[in-house]
Amino acid sequence: MAGIEHGKVTNEEFMEEVARYECVYKRNTPVHGKWGSWQPADWSSVSCSGGKKTRRRNCDNPSPAHGGSSCRGSSKGSIDCDECSNGNGGCEHKCVNYDGSYTCKCYPGYKPRTDNFRRCDRITCATSNWPSPSNGYSSCSDVSQVSSGTNCIVTCNHGYIINGPTSSRCGNDGTWSPSSTPNCQVSECSSLSPPDDGDITPSICKTKPLHGQVCSNQCKPGYTLVGSTSTTCDNGHWTQAGFHCRVEEEPRTLWRCRR
């Protein structure tokens, strides 16, 4: 009698006996899944997409079978792309990489362009916000804008002195520091004191003479002026030294004697 798959026959030795068939339970061993190799094997051959490099693997080494467990973990692996490593990310100044993307930064004194974040424009200050004073001028007065980091210096005209800051710097934020503007004040000379038997005119020469003031010196009748007849206040200094009055000598009378 022929055998049967997954079983056996008993009592088949004698003629006319009843044969018994018995099935034998056969259990297959579970096969647990294991991961195959990553594809591609080398990250350097993987292209960036959305700021990431991604590769995959299959649970086929072997595949799970007969109730075996599947592979643990993810079939997908990703790492961040360093966009800055390739041509500085196209950034004109600094490239800053972070997980999933990157950004461009400008050096101090520069700002990103509104139409292209990879490019930078120099920050400027308007010279109209720190103008030249009356009776003076600024070293930046011939332009309407100056670049950040520029120092503008004020000089007063001859006969004037500065009141306030002598310079200001265009900052990296586009503002002036200091922001206060100077002015040029007319210079003064020390007041003059007339000598005995003399006078100085006009009277302002004896109180608060200003730049450009001409003062006249004079003596009383009977006195002779010794020194300059006038002096001028020039940028805080007198152009001539002081004077004094000397009494006039009476003319000598010559007597002719007879012999």
Image: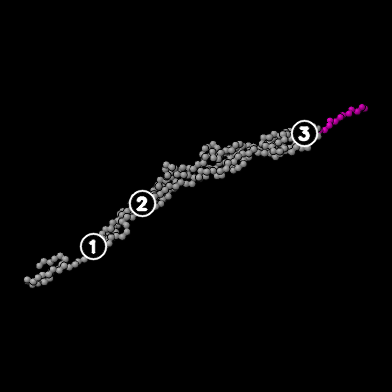
Report x, y in % for residue 193: 74, 38
Q: Is residue 179 at least partly visible in the picture? A: yes
Residue at image position (60%, 42%) is 164
Q: Is residue 226 at least partly visible in the picture? A: no
Q: Say whether marks 2 and 1 touch (CB < 8 Å).
A: no
Three-letter code for the amino acid on which mark 3 is drawn: Cys
The N terminus sits in image quarter: bottom left
Of the residues under marks 2 and 3, which one precedes in the sequence?
2
Which picture quadrant has residue 213? top right
Q: Say whether marks 3 and 1 touch (CB < 8 Å).
A: no
Which SS does the magenta portion mostly show?
Answer: loop
Crowding at label 1, few (<14), some or many (≥20) Cα neighbours within 10 Å?
Answer: few
Quick one: SS at disc 3? strand
Crowding at label 3, few (<14), some or many (≥20) Cα neighbours within 10 Å?
Answer: many
Residue at image position (79%, 32%) is 221
Residue under numbered circle 3: 219
- Colouring style: one colour
Q: What's the CA distance linking mark 2 and mark 3?
A: 99 Å
Residue under numbered circle 1: 66
The C terminus sits in image quarter: top right
Between residue 45 and residue 212, name the one nearer to us.
Answer: 212
Does 159 sit left or right of 151 as displayed?
right
Of the residues under marks 2 and 1, which one precedes in the sequence?
2
Residue under numbered circle 2: 52
Q: Is residue 118 above or below residue 17?
A: above
Q: Is residue 256 above or below residue 42?
A: above
Report x, y in % for residue 172: 50, 45
Q: What's the CA distance linking mark 2 and mark 1?
A: 37 Å
User: Which stretch appears magenta?
Assistant: 248-259
